Image (tube, rainbow, N blue to C red):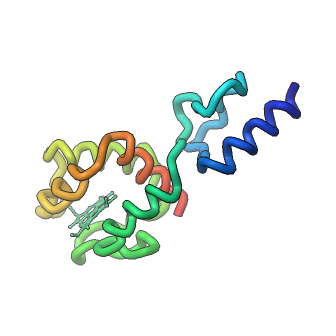
Amino acid sequence: MKKIYMRTWLVVAASLVIVSCGSNDFDTDGGGTSVAVGSCVYDETRIKEYFVRCSGCHGSEGDVAALGVSRPIAHMPADELYDMLLQYKEGTLNQYELGGIMKGQASLYSDEDLKGLSCYISEM
Ligand code: HEC
């Protein structure tokens, strides 16, 4: 049973990138592509394309201080990134007086895609 589950997981992993964000409680019923809460599932190809926009200011490795003010965003915990991106989208986060710029960026994406971006950036 364990082996069958592992094989299912590999098939799923081939089409999706599954990153555990500090938790290993993947959905163990093996019945579908969904993953338990606490884990990250995202379409790597699509999210990488989205990140090209971000990299204009944050660097292709996410290690640049955007417009000279932000922290390097690569490797920040995914939940922290997601939280910030949601707040930028709502217009309630303004850390260095340039929150308006990030509102414009975050507003372009669905919450789900912002979560995917957060997972991707945390794993850079
Ligand atoms: C036009 C330049 C620009 C682009 C493009 C851009 N950002 Fe930003 N980003 C900024 C600036 C400026 C800040 C600082 C905002 C503030 O004052 O809070 C920032 C802040 C952030 C922060 C918080 C950093 C910290 O220091 O806490 C995150 C996370 C972030 N951006 C993610 C993204 C993501 C993801 C994308 C792509 C969807 C993106 N940014 C696109 C300019 C940009």
Q: Is residue 88 left or right of residue 119?
A: left
Residue at 66% from the left image edge and 36% from the top image edge: 24
The x, y position of residue 81, in whole percent, is 37, 50
Please report the residue visible at 43 percent of the width from the left and 43 percent of the height from the top: 79
The residue closer to the viewer here, 76 or 88, is 88
Residue 17: image location, x then y, percent: 60, 50
Instruction: Kindly identify the residue that appears in the image at 49 percent across and 60 percent down.
Output: 75
Quarter, ligand 1: bottom left
* Location of residue 109 in the rendering, given as x and y in whole percent from the top left corner: 29, 49
Q: Nearer the viewer, residue 75 or 53?
A: 53
| Total marks placed | 0
**Where does the N terminus fall, quadrant-wise?**
top right
Of residue 113 and residue 85, the one placed in the foreground of this image is 113
Task: Name the residue: 42% across, 74% down.
Answer: 60
Q: Is residue 4 left or right of residue 28?
A: right
Residue 51 in which image quadrant: bottom left
Q: From what the image shows, is residue 35 above or below residue 115? A: above
Q: In this rendered view, identify the residue nearer to me: 111 or 24.
A: 111
* Displayed quadrant of residue 94: bottom left
In the rendered structure, the answer to whether residue 1 lies left or right of residue 102 reads right
Place of residue 82 in the rendered image (x, y in percent of width and height, measured from the top left): 36, 45
Q: Is residue 51 above or below residue 92?
A: below
